[in-house]
Image (tube, rainbow, N blue to C red):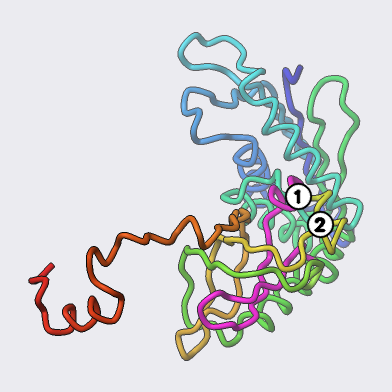
């Protein structure tokens, strides 16, 4: 159980004796903001300790303002997510899907400061947890090897995008695989016949992992893909991102079951059509 979280900020290597108040305090503010879930407005991080020396260290404890008791269970999932994602950064990887979307930019601000002004920061996510340390080199590697290539790829993929909107497309699967390091299918759209790459989200990829590995098992199946549609400059859909996928079931129907021998009444088919054309049966 997480009772307290400790955060330490150290000066940059070029200025071992200089750590500005603004850098140190803002780094700590942003860090504890990452641990805060705005949907639980009754939970706050109480300041347990703050150093007055460099390196700057502070310790926080989650408190439920309704009872002023510890709120450790409330924050445990968020703390685990932030710890796991900073470990990923330290190992040269990007944030995973557990990082709250609304907190990604805050996390990048923390890393950005570590490339200019902050030497490194260390977080201890609980009394018995191992310290997680992000150095200046770790932060630089993140931006150069992880974030910037993603931004370049995004610009390449969506350079011709005129607008985006949530929606869905139906069609048949032509291909299953990877689209620029993301699980994806190639959809032959039902109305236009156009082949449209559809990137599926992590939850869908995990749920359908066995089928995706099977590959051919999905081929030519009819599906509906719902996600963020990206349209080209002519207003036609060109790609779906963050998609969810559902199969459309079709059933074979015997023609004999659809036939109705009594439909034309006492008339032959030819006579019935003639009378229908002359409007002898009245208006519908």
Seen as rendered, the residue at the extreme bottom is 234
| Residue toward you, 230 or 249 | 249
- Give the residues in magenta: 182-207
Above or below, 54 relative to 70: below
- Estimate the x, y position of residue 29 in percent, counting from the top left: 61, 41
Query: Splitting the image into 4 quarters, where does residue 151 fall?
Result: bottom right
| Residue shown at 37% from the left, 60% from the top | 260
Determine contact: label 2, label 1, CB under 8 Å: yes
| Residue shown at 62% from the left, 66% from the top | 241
Give the crowd class for mark 2: few <14, some 14-19, many >=20 residues within 10 Å: some
Judged from the image, the secondary structure of the residue bearing numbered disc 2 is: helix
Count up the numbered dots: 2
Return the mark for residue 208. Answer: 1
- Estimate the x, y position of residue 110 in percent, counting from the top left: 70, 53
| Residue toward you, 82 or 14 | 82
Above or below, 119 relative to 266: above
Above or below, 101 relative to 163: above
| Residue shown at 23% from the left, 76% from the top | 272
| Residue toward you, 233 or 263 | 263
Left or right side of 105 for 88: right
Give the crowd class for mark 1: few <14, some 14-19, many >=20 residues within 10 Å: few
- Estimate the x, y position of residue 96 in percent, counting from the top left: 76, 50
Magenta region includes residue 194: yes
Left or right side of 34 for 211: right
Which residue is disc 2 drawn over? Answer: 212
């Amino acid at each position: 159980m997480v009772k307290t979280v400790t955060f330490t900020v150290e000066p940059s290597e070029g200025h071992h004796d200089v750590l500005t108040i603004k850098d140190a305090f803002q780094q700590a503010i942003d860090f504890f903001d990452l641990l805060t879930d705005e949907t639980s407005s009754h939970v706050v991080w109480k300041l347990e300790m703050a150093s007055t020396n460099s390196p700057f260290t502070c310790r926080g404890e989650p408190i439920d303002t309704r009872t002023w008791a510890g709120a450790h269970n409330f924050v445990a999932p968020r703390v685990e997510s932030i710890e796991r994602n900073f470990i990923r950064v330290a190992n040269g990887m990007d944030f995973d899907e557990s990082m709250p979307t609304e907190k990604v930019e805050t996390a990048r601000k923390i890393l950005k400061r570590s490339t200019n002004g902050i030497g490194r920061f260390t977080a201890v996510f609980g009394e018995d947890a191992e310290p997680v340390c992000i150095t200046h080199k770790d932060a630089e590697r993140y931006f150069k090897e992880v974030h910037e290539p993603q931004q370049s790829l995004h610009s390449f993929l969506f350079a011709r995008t005129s607008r985006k909107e949530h929606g869905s497309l139906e069609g048949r699967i032509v291909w299953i695989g990877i689209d620029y390091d993301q699980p994806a299918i190639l959809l032959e759209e039902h109305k236009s016949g156009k082949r449209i790459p559809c990137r599926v989200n992590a939850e869908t990829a995990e749920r359908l992992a066995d089928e995706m590995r099977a590959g051919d098992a999905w081929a030519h199946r009819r599906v509906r893909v719902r996600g963020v549609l990206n349209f080209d400059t002519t207003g036609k859909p060109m790609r779906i991102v963050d998609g969810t996928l559902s199969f459309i079931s079709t059933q074979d129907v015997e023609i004999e079951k659809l036939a109705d021998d009594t439909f034309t009444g006492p008339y032959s088919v030819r006579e019935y059509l003639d009378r229908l054309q002359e409007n002898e049966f009245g208006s519908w």
